[in-house]
Amino acid sequence: FFSFVLIFIMGDASAELAKDRQFMDLYSRQIGAFGLEAMVKLIKMKVLIVGMKGVGVEVAKNTALAGVHTLSLYDPTPATIRDLGSNFFLTEADLDKSRGGVCAPKVQELNPNVKVVNVLELTEEVVGAHDAVVFTMGSKSELIRWNEFCRSRTKLEPDARGFPCAKPAPILFISCIMAGVVGSTFVDHGSGYILRDKDGKEPLAKLVTNMIQKTEEVKNPDGTVEQKPYTLVHYITPDGQPPGSLPDDCLVQFSEVIGCAGINESGSWRSCQVDGDPVNTVRIGNTLCFPTPYVSGGMMTEVKEARPIPFRSLAQCITHPSNTEVGVVQQDLDQGFVMVDMMSMFSAGGVESQIHLALQGVQEFEMKHGHLPEPHNAAHTDECVQLAKDFNETLKKLQEVAPAGEGGYKPLVIEEVDEATIKKVANYAAVELQPLCCFFGGVVSQELVKVSGKFTPIQQWLNYHVFKVLPEEPPMDTKPLNCRYDDQIAVFGQAFQEKLGKLKLFMVGCGALGCEFVKNFAMMGVCCQGGTLWITDNDRIEVSNLNRQFLFREDNVGQPKSEAAGKRAGTMNPKINIDARQDLVASNTEHIFDDAFWMNLDLVCNALDNMKARLYVDGRCVFYEKPLLESGTMGTGANVDVVVPHMTRSYADGGEADERGGIPMCTLRNFPHIIDHCIEWARAQFEDFFVSPVQQAGNFLENPMAFLDKEKADTLGLDNGGERASAISKAIPKLVQLKKMLEVGASKPTMSTCVEMAVELFYRLFRDKIMDLTGKFPEDAKTSKGEPFWSGHKKYPQSLKVDTGLERDLDFICSTANLFASMLKIHGPKPPSEKNDPNHRWMAEYRDKNWLLAEIAKVTVPDYQKGSVEVDDEDGAAEKEDEGAAEAQLNALLTDLAKLGSTESSGFEPADFEKDDDDNFHIDFVTATANLRASNYHIPEAPRHKCKMIAGRIIPAIATTTASVTGLVMVEMLKILQGKPIDAMMNGNFDIGSNTYMMFDSEPPIKIKTRTFTEFDQVMMVEAEKTITAFPNPHTKYDKLWVEGAKDMTLQQVIDTLQEKTSLTIYAVSVGAEGEEGKTVYNDMLRTTHVNLPRPVMEVIESNGKSLKGRIMCDFLQINFMDEDDEDVEVAKVVLKF
């Protein structure tokens, strides 16, 4: 029934899984984050979740989307109206029904490949049948009992003699307690857990440039000194890869090294970095053992080092949680509390420990009374405080008897119990706040993935709080209303809940982040009482969206995301008012999202996946002074940025995103040295052969004579000799390709024609271009300095010929032929990807291997055709071409093209690269092309999914991180709506893969002030003081200089008004949006611009390309001010109000 699971009866599971294209498409983003090996383990995994309240259903949702084998749910508790505030699968029709029974079929809808089971009774047999169990309910004594059971599980496995033997097989045990504004997760992988990859990142790879034998003096214990040999490895970072050193004391292995015979097969080497050594070097052991010295080249790749982590039981960790002095985890071997407050690293008794103590008091209260302390019940709260203190006193006595346990674990003793913290925990312990459920749901789900040994598990506590969200003064209207929002009302009050319902909120984007936000809004009652939630996203749902955009199902594929999300949210909370749109939010849609729209909003939430759109929305929020909720994810990492006008910096002030450096064109063209270069090159070939030439042909056929006249003007019409020769050289290959395409288009091409073209392209790319390069630079070529040309990152390539015995070569010819067929309109339009059928693939007859082999056999291998070589360095100066011959060739081409302008053709269809359609041949072409290129340069080939990730610019994305970050964003939203001060606002970055939480206070906006500084005067050649004046002094990006009544003003009147307001002089005015280079409409020194002064300012703006439709104000005037000393002045943004 779950078809892809059957692959495990075959050979290498990872390799077989990679062949399942339907599976790879569905989980492509998740595989990018987890890796294929972790996915193999994940889809075999059986998980049991106990408790289906808010955090339980979040874990179930994320785990189902991740694609485990079996997901069992246990919660026989009847659903109550209060549960509807955090469980998005429950409706009013489900009240009094079993929470587990209601949720199971709805969780099943999320992923038909997961077996979802409703467990009716929690027995040892049931728990023992699973690989992991998550408890989100249960008393402390119950949790301790089940933890001991999970730790003690064994499985019968054959020993060395073949006899069955009981071996430890612990079940991953996770408990997650939600207590209002705090949450606590405990994790136990058992005593034999092995961590294989602590961060889940790709191993760093460096290019070896030299290996030098050295010695150092080492003092022995007996006082003698000896010379110890070592090897110093010099390296550089491959083009396009992030810079940075290798981790200290890491393992590395070598490949592709020339010389040091045997080092490539020698396995891992321990490396180290020593102060005083040159930069970009590491030391390894003695390489004198190899028979030959180092010659050149090589790759040095980081090896992820496995290490055991002995987890301890819940009972042990309650009393002895840490082996560190301060309780929090700071280094790899530490165990205790994940650090969530940087101050906790300096002394014991930090907030993480205080929460642990508080929860012990709450759990003791629950065991004593059979229920949790009630909200705002002072007697209950005080009793919890006393119980927490009693627990602390018990541990103090234990410490006196046994100061340290096995492994250095000490009893948790807090010298100063923080009663305020205990009370905050106890007062809301019976409350489940939906945002915190969302956050912990992602964290816990990610812990399940760590069974694979990938990513660092929680060791062993995570106590997280959002104390700063609590109202400054306890509200008086917290009495329950017997409604779905009672948990929120218990914390924030009824009036605040009504405020949430009346919000006017704009969410931009509706992908993975957007789906989570919409669910959160529905659960929290946002826009559910007279408010409106506008959602806009111009994208449609694809199969690859389904494993992380949980509002969508298979029957939604092809539908607009915003509409589908809005409908699904309506089933979660029928009262939510959503206006779903499909419009881009950009400068060209400001007539849709106009001034009136923006000014009507209370709040904006970004759910975007690209920087350009984020920055545009950020700019609009600054202009209209609207709070912005910003967030993003990258694999297991995420960021939260809260923007409040006049209070915090804007998103744009946060600096540039961390991106990899670009790959130099010369590297792509001639000197690739890692597979990423080959993939990027292959992606470029797709554009060069199936997009650009078709667009060029379309331009030609539209008006042949105009096209040819322009080509002549751009080449033969140039006067400068060097510029002319260069233009002719660049034009010839494009025109040759255009001519060939027009000739083929006019010849009534068939699929046989397309196969012939594919074979010709194979030889052009992988034989002729390589022979051109090696012909110009033979293997023994030298640089101008007499050094080997083929050294460092330059790999000497080999040419290829078609080998029909290799699947790679056939894949290239098959995909290329079919892409040519689509381009030449031999194939009809491809149906949308949601109609792909693995049993009836598009153009199946032209994928058939026998047909393809027969067609290839008809093709004559083309002769080698010499071409030019472009190398961007002094040693690769291009050979001087015969300019006369080149000019003659160009003239001949132009003549031939003129004749072809009158021929009939069925036209051409350019390809539109689509990474998520596995039947359109696009990724097939890129994969085959990249791997052939890799074979040219002796680079290990890449699997299809890696080519898809890189060529498609796919950002690794997973449901767990997305859920977590949106939960924290909702917390910040609650703070904004309460009008909290800046020291309550939290920005930050966190990573649920490595358990790092770097949350920090928001920063105030940058103040632009009048300032004096010293600079070097290039004219006078002396140091000179310079003053830059600010007006107003100071001001921020949120401040504005308003010009009222501008609708009836001329440009001169606007200038006069501003000069009067500022007592400054305006010497230039341009028209343009922020960040654009404006068009000058007035300059005091240019008399020709003075004609604009008497013109109406609106006319001046619109005549320079800026529409004012729907605007009641605008900031399109870029105005330059100067003071009485003729020095420029930095002035606040000028805004015209019409």
Image (cartoon, rainbow, N blue to C red):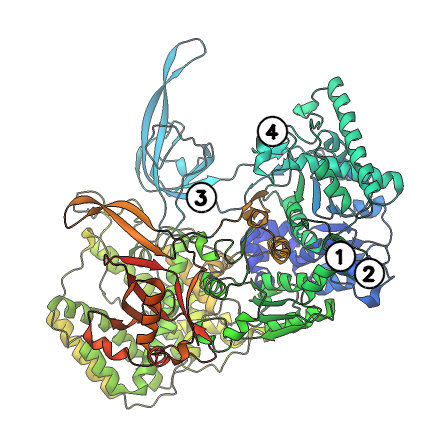
How far apart are the alpha carbons under marks 1 and 4?
36 Å
Determine whether the residue tagged by mark 1 lies in a helix, strand or loop.
Answer: helix
Relative side of 495 to 902, left or right: right
Residue 972: give its label: none
Helix, strand or loop at label 3? It is loop
State which tag comes first along the sequence, 4 or 2.
4
Provide the secondary structure element on which disc 4 rests: loop
| Above or below 1137: residue 808 | above
Q: Give the crowd class for mark 1: few <14, some 14-19, many >=20 residues within 10 Å.
A: many
Local crowd at mark 4 within 10 Å, few (<14), some, or many (≥20)?
few
Q: Are marks 2 and 1 in contact (CB under 8 Å)?
A: yes
641 relative to 683 in the view: left or right: right
* Residue that badge 2 annotates: 481
When the figure is inspected, residue 512 is found, relative to residue 442, above or below; the finding is below
Q: Which residue is mark 1?
A: 489
If you read the primary sequence from the N terminus, does the residue marked by circle 4 or circle 3 appear first?
A: 3
Residue holding disc 3: 204
Q: Amino acid at mark 4?
A: Ser
Instruction: Residue 999 in the image: state x and y as whole percent.
Output: 56, 45
Q: Residue at x 15, y 50 (%)?
A: 1019
Q: Earlier in the sequence, mark 1 or mark 4?
A: 4
Gap between marks 4 and 2 measured at Cα: 44 Å
* Residue placed under numbered mark 4 in the picture: 347
Sequence-wise first label, 3 or 2: 3
Res 930 quadrant in image:
bottom left
Q: CA distance from mark 2 to mark 1?
A: 9 Å
**Looking at the image, do the residues carrying marks 1 and 3 touch, with CB atoms under 8 Å apart?**
no
